[in-house]
Amino acid sequence: MSRLIDSILIPTDDSEGALTGAKHAIALASRIGADVHVLSVVAVRSDLDEIAGVVESVYASLEAEAEDAVETVADMVRSHDADLEVTTTVKRGTPFQTIREYATRREIDLIAMGTKGRTGLDRVLLGSVTENVLRTARTPVLAVPPNADPTGIDEITFDGFLLPTDGSDGAEIATDWGIALANRLESMVHTVYSVDTNRVPQANEPGEILQALEHSGEDAIDTVRERAVDTGVSVSGAIATGSPADVILTAATDRDVDLIVMGTHGRTGIGQWFLGSVTENVVRQADVPVFCVPVSAESP
């Protein structure tokens, strides 16, 4: 890629949650000069297919609302940064599948979306849609919680990142993205490794197991630190004890970071985490956006 992120896709249903996601996406696009694609999906309902003569009028009404939704975001983009290129699209389909397919066909580098949306027949439930996109997308997803809502796009910052690691392939690709993005945005990085004592057996020399896990944590943190230093990114690191999601959320608060960057899949087993479930828990509970990188993503 000529740039780290050339294009950002913003799915929207015109809800407050979707607009919060859009604000962060626009702020990021403006900082890195990425093109913006805005997509609204009208969910196809099988029960409507049986209502003869009514289906098309219903869908026409929903598509008109979807057009308004994408234009609202497009106007936000143009008002914030007139130099950004904006493409708007309305499609019918299953929301998460349509979002994923659009991203694939248009070679989108990042999908940015709120974690909460509208409910009801004519709206997309962005909460469940976001989780499905996270589970199936092959490109990074920026998941923005509703409580991350800024008063203005100009107030959104990317000064500090939290980069959790467990030494897995999933964490490694997230590290590549996190450090590259931090370098592009001139951000500081804090990395953290969780030693989950709940997974350590009470017998068979637990002290030795803990020591081995701490050594693994030191190696994982050193790997992140070396990569950051090589690219000129300021970095700090720490090993913490506790469940991975709790450690990550606590570190994000204590360090007052603007963004958490993590893989969507990691290790399983004693003392190591399956980052899939951890990522979902972090996305649900975080007060800041979470930049989720699938293990299948290409290195930046």
Image (cartoon, rainbow, N blue to C red):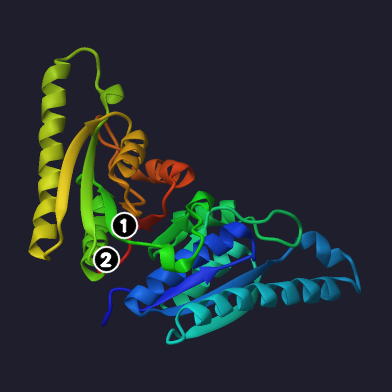
Labels 1 and 2: the sequence-earlier one: 2
Q: Could you tell me the amino acid type at mark 2? A: Leu
Q: Is label 1 in a helix, a strand or a loop?
A: loop
Q: Position of residue 203 (x, y in %)?
A: 20, 12
Q: How many marks?
A: 2
| Mark 1 and mark 2 residues within 8 Å of each other at the beta carbon | no
Q: Position of residue 292 (x, y in %)?
A: 37, 56
The quadrant of the image that shows the N terminus is bottom left
Instruction: Quickly name the residue at label 2.
Output: 181
Q: Position of residue 105 (x, y in %)?
A: 47, 78
Left or right of residue 277, residue 62 in this image: right
**Residue at horizontal 76%, vertical 58%?**
121
- Checking the image for residue 295, the label placed there is 1
- Checking the image for residue 40, the label placed there is none
**Residue at horizontal 51%, vertical 82%?**
78
Residue placed furthest toward the top: 203
Query: For residue 293, what is the image quadrant?
Result: bottom left
Residue 132 shows up from this direction? yes
- Does residue 98 lie above or below 207 as drawn? below
Q: Is label 2 in a helix, a strand or a loop?
A: helix
- Does residue 188 lie above or below 105 as drawn? above
**Residue at horizontal 55%, vertical 68%?**
11
Q: Position of residue 254 (x, y in %)?
A: 30, 40
Residue placed furthest toward the right: 53
Q: Nearer the viewer, residue 140 or 54?
A: 140
- Does residue 82 lie above or below 170 as drawn? below
Query: For residue 75, what is the image quadrant?
Result: bottom right
Left or right of residue 181, residue 100 in this image: right
- Does residue 9 lie above or below 247 as drawn? below
Residue 109 shows up from this direction? no
Q: Could you tell me the amino acid type at mark 1? A: Val
Crowding at dot 2, Cα within 10 Å, few <14 / some 14-19 / many 20+, comes out as many
